[in-house]
Image: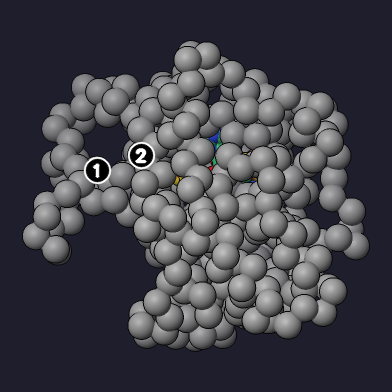
Amino acid sequence: MPNSDSSFTRPIADALGRPLRSLRVSVTDRCNLRCHYCMPEDEYVWLQREEILKFEEISELAGIFAALGVNKIRLTGGEPLLRHDLSALIRLLAQKEGIQDLALTTNGVLLRRHAKDLRAAGLQRITVSLDTLRPERFQTLTRSVAHSAVLDGIQAAREAGFNNIKVNAVIMRGFNEDELTDLIQFGRQIGGEIRFIEYMDVGGATRWSLDKVMTRAEMLEALKRRFGAIRPVVDDSDGSAEIRSKAPADEFEFQDGVRFGIISSTSQPFCRSCDRSRLTPDGVWFLCLYASQGIDLKKLLRSGAPHEVIAETIRQAWTERRDRGAEERKLLNARGVLFPVEELRKDPRREMHTRGG
Ligand code: SAM
Ligand code: SF4
Ligand code: SF4
């Protein structure tokens, strides 16, 4: 079981005072869906198999990060359940000292097959991405007919004992903005929490444009019209009564107490409190979702560098970190796609499905 002692390690802080707390580990760049907002192209350049970190290597790096203050790890991708025997990795990570929160983001297609094993291995939380409740719309969005498999996967996760499953739904204007209400009802049915995500101009979103973004303000307005008053969930544990920022989602509540989240990275970015970094399947560490370059930790690891040297590389990079990618994007006058297709092909680590959402 993960260590529950939050004092295990005081995290290092970056140049803006933000702690190194949360690590997203992308375990594969492969995916069994082709979501329009993430992988809209017909062809992709894939990472070479021999470049992909073995579970033992991920575990080794996770241990170094934990010793520097990381206490949350989320496995993502690509589609993480495509990685053979992912539970074996969960088992390794669940035993790491200092890791208090171990979570997975999945598209849910293969969840029925793996939910029980993941639970038994020590996975604590699951987020499933599901943008529509309509099978034909799902097919248009993902180029797959696996809609019922995703619903069944969510059911399997509940049966396996995962409580309060989070469901991520990217809302795109003109596509699924009319499903906010149905998705809220779906969240109620499964005893989970829906988190609406603004369409982001991340690497790989080569069809992105500002007019397709439904903003947090617009979502709240639409939901108020349907369900009545909504109040932000306030965390007054420290007496400051601020809107609870279980970053990256802001949480809200209807009058009946049902909660939902909105991740408003496009219209109201939350870089100032960002404690997240990302590791690609081939071991390159990115300090920001929008960064063009990362730091090759696999190279160090495979060259036999001692842990202290890798830790020092991480420490130095984090203490110099000033990234505020989403806030900088928001300040642009003309906002288009982040990287053109040719640049993504030259360096696939710039893709969302490689560096992990
Ligand atoms: N394949 C898994 C899944 O879909 O849950 C994990 C990886 S996916 C890259 C992680 C998250 O990123 C998903 O919830 C997905 O909806 C989100 N995402 C991908 N592209 C996005 C975009 N352009 N805007 C907002 N969210 C995006
Ligand atoms: Fe969709 Fe996730 Fe695959 Fe991207 S990585 S195409 S969001 S399922
Ligand atoms: Fe953090 Fe970068 Fe995302 Fe801002 S854009 S919240 S700094 S990862």
Q: Earlier in the sequence, mark 1 or mark 2?
A: 1
Q: Residue at x 77, y 78 (%)?
A: 305
Q: Position of residue 124 (x, y in %)?
A: 48, 71
Left or right: where 115 falls relative to 300: left
Q: Which residue is mark 1?
A: 252
Identify the disc placed on residue 206: none
| Nearer to the camera, 313 or 150 | 313
Instruction: Assess disc 1: are there few (<14), some (14-19) or many (≥20) residues with their C-alpha within 10 Å of its C-alpha.
Output: many
Q: Position of residue 334 (x, y in %)?
A: 52, 14
Q: CA distance from mark 1 to mark 2?
A: 8 Å
SS category of the residue bearing label 1? strand
**Is residue 256 placed above or below 206 in the rendered structure?**
below
Q: Position of residue 290 (x, y in %)?
A: 58, 39
**Is residue 277 placed above or below 250 in the rendered structure?**
below
Q: Which residue is mark 2?
A: 262
| Nearer to the camera, 186 or 49 | 49
